[in-house]
Amino acid sequence: MFSHVMIGANDIAAAKRFYDAALGALGVPPGEIDIRNRVVYSHDGSRFLITLPLNGEPADGANGGTLGFKAASPEEVDAWHAAGLANGGTAIEDPPGVRYVPDGRVVHLAYLRDPSGNKLCGFYRIK
Protein backbone atom coordinates (compact mmCIF):
# COMPACT_ATOMS: atom_id res chain seq x y z
CA MET A 1 0.00 0.00 0.00
CA PHE A 2 2.79 2.48 0.83
CA SER A 3 5.74 3.41 -1.33
CA HIS A 4 7.42 5.37 1.45
CA VAL A 5 6.95 7.10 4.77
CA MET A 6 8.63 10.40 5.68
CA ILE A 7 8.76 11.95 9.13
CA GLY A 8 10.25 15.15 10.47
CA ALA A 9 13.18 15.52 12.84
CA ASN A 10 14.82 18.48 14.54
CA ASP A 11 18.33 16.99 14.52
CA ILE A 12 19.20 14.85 11.49
CA ALA A 13 22.40 13.47 13.05
CA ALA A 14 20.57 12.39 16.23
CA ALA A 15 17.76 10.88 14.17
CA LYS A 16 20.22 8.94 12.01
CA ARG A 17 22.06 7.62 15.08
CA PHE A 18 18.75 6.51 16.64
CA TYR A 19 17.27 4.91 13.51
CA ASP A 20 20.53 3.28 12.38
CA ALA A 21 20.61 1.47 15.74
CA ALA A 22 16.90 0.71 16.13
CA LEU A 23 16.28 -0.31 12.52
CA GLY A 24 19.62 -2.11 12.41
CA ALA A 25 18.22 -4.43 15.09
CA LEU A 26 15.52 -5.33 12.53
CA GLY A 27 18.06 -6.06 9.78
CA VAL A 28 17.70 -2.72 7.99
CA PRO A 29 20.95 -1.30 6.56
CA PRO A 30 22.13 2.11 7.86
CA GLY A 31 20.45 5.13 6.36
CA GLU A 32 22.11 7.24 3.69
CA ILE A 33 22.09 11.04 3.58
CA ASP A 34 20.76 12.28 0.23
CA ILE A 35 21.49 15.57 -1.54
CA ARG A 36 18.66 17.28 0.39
CA ASN A 37 20.16 16.23 3.77
CA ARG A 38 17.40 13.67 4.35
CA VAL A 39 18.15 10.26 5.86
CA VAL A 40 16.91 7.51 3.57
CA TYR A 41 16.42 3.87 4.59
CA SER A 42 15.62 1.28 1.90
CA HIS A 43 14.56 -2.25 2.83
CA ASP A 44 12.36 -4.94 1.27
CA GLY A 45 11.05 -2.59 -1.41
CA SER A 46 10.05 0.20 1.00
CA ARG A 47 11.64 3.52 1.85
CA PHE A 48 11.62 5.41 5.14
CA LEU A 49 12.85 9.01 5.09
CA ILE A 50 13.64 11.55 7.79
CA THR A 51 13.82 15.26 7.03
CA LEU A 52 13.92 18.66 8.64
CA PRO A 53 10.38 20.04 8.24
CA LEU A 54 10.10 21.83 4.90
CA ASN A 55 8.08 24.69 6.40
CA GLY A 56 10.91 25.62 8.80
CA GLU A 57 8.80 24.91 11.89
CA PRO A 58 10.02 22.48 14.57
CA ALA A 59 9.23 18.79 14.08
CA ASP A 60 7.00 17.14 16.67
CA GLY A 61 5.30 13.77 17.08
CA ALA A 62 1.93 13.40 15.40
CA ASN A 63 -0.76 13.49 18.08
CA GLY A 64 -2.47 10.11 17.83
CA GLY A 65 -0.04 8.82 15.21
CA THR A 66 2.15 5.73 15.52
CA LEU A 67 4.63 4.33 13.03
CA GLY A 68 4.99 0.54 13.33
CA PHE A 69 8.06 -1.46 12.34
CA LYS A 70 7.60 -5.18 11.61
CA ALA A 71 10.03 -7.57 13.29
CA ALA A 72 10.86 -11.20 12.52
CA SER A 73 10.60 -12.39 16.14
CA PRO A 74 9.81 -11.25 19.69
CA GLU A 75 13.56 -11.13 20.33
CA GLU A 76 13.99 -8.75 17.41
CA VAL A 77 11.29 -6.47 18.88
CA ASP A 78 13.16 -6.44 22.19
CA ALA A 79 16.49 -5.74 20.43
CA TRP A 80 14.84 -2.88 18.49
CA HIS A 81 13.55 -1.40 21.74
CA ALA A 82 16.91 -1.73 23.53
CA ALA A 83 18.83 -0.23 20.59
CA GLY A 84 16.42 2.70 20.43
CA LEU A 85 16.72 3.37 24.17
CA ALA A 86 20.51 3.26 23.97
CA ASN A 87 20.50 5.83 21.15
CA GLY A 88 18.27 8.63 22.36
CA GLY A 89 14.81 7.03 22.37
CA THR A 90 12.35 7.18 25.25
CA ALA A 91 10.35 4.20 26.52
CA ILE A 92 6.61 4.78 26.58
CA GLU A 93 3.52 2.77 27.49
CA ASP A 94 3.95 -0.75 28.89
CA PRO A 95 7.30 -2.56 28.79
CA PRO A 96 7.93 -4.73 25.70
CA GLY A 97 5.90 -7.91 25.75
CA VAL A 98 2.90 -9.95 24.70
CA ARG A 99 -0.46 -8.28 24.16
CA TYR A 100 -3.76 -10.00 23.52
CA VAL A 101 -5.86 -8.16 20.96
CA PRO A 102 -9.67 -8.43 21.26
CA ASP A 103 -10.01 -10.14 17.86
CA GLY A 104 -7.94 -13.10 19.11
CA ARG A 105 -4.55 -12.05 17.75
CA VAL A 106 -1.52 -12.34 19.99
CA VAL A 107 1.29 -9.86 19.34
CA HIS A 108 4.62 -8.91 20.89
CA LEU A 109 4.97 -5.11 21.01
CA ALA A 110 7.32 -2.43 22.24
CA TYR A 111 6.83 1.34 22.07
CA LEU A 112 9.34 4.21 21.89
CA ARG A 113 9.48 7.89 21.08
CA ASP A 114 12.36 8.89 18.83
CA PRO A 115 14.53 11.93 19.66
CA SER A 116 11.99 14.25 17.94
CA GLY A 117 8.97 12.76 19.76
CA ASN A 118 7.58 10.52 17.00
CA LYS A 119 5.74 7.51 18.46
CA LEU A 120 7.07 4.17 17.21
CA CYS A 121 6.08 0.55 17.68
CA GLY A 122 8.12 -2.61 17.21
CA PHE A 123 5.63 -5.31 16.16
CA TYR A 124 5.66 -9.09 15.83
CA ARG A 125 2.48 -11.11 15.29
CA ILE A 126 2.61 -14.36 17.29
CA LYS A 127 -0.87 -15.63 16.39
Image: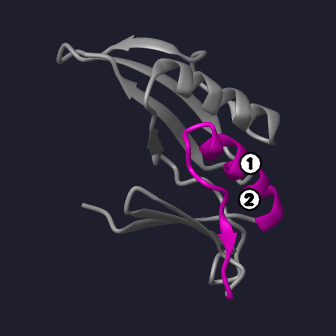
> Can residue 36 be seen at all in this image of the molecule?
yes
| Number of other residues with Cα within 10 Å of mark 2, as a class: few under 14, some 14 to 19, many 20 or more | many
Quadrant of the snapshot with the N terminus: bottom left
Q: Secondary structure under badge 2?
A: helix
113 shown above or below 30: above
Q: Is 87 displayed left or right of 59 in the figure?
A: right
Residue at the spot x=63%, y=84% of the render?
Answer: 55
Q: Is 86 displayed left or right of 79 in the figure?
A: right
Residue 24 at x, y percent in the picture: 64, 44
Q: Is 52 displayed left or right of 64 in the figure?
A: right
97 shown above or below 79: above
Residue at the spot x=77%, y=66% of the render?
Answer: 12
| Residue sitting nearer the eye, 44 or 112 | 44
Quadrant of the snapshot with the C terminus: top left
Question: In the rendered structure, are the residues bearing label 1 and label 2 in contact, judged by CB atoms less than 8 Å apart?
Answer: yes
| Number of other residues with Cα within 10 Å of mark 1, as a class: few under 14, some 14 to 19, many 20 or more | many
Amino acid beneath label 1 = Phe
In the rendered image, which quarter is residue 40 located in? bottom right
Q: Is 111 displayed left or right of 37 in the figure?
A: left
Q: Which residue is mark 2?
A: 16
Amino acid beneath label 2 = Lys
The residues colored magenta run: 12-35
Q: Is residue 18 magenta?
A: yes
Residue 54 at x, y percent in the picture: 62, 83
> Can residue 11 be seen at all in this image of the molecule?
no
Residue at the spot x=80%, y=42% of the render?
Answer: 88
For the residues labelled 1 and 2, the Cα–Cα distance comes to 5 Å
Q: Which residue is mark 1?
A: 18
Any mark on residue 93, and which? Answer: none
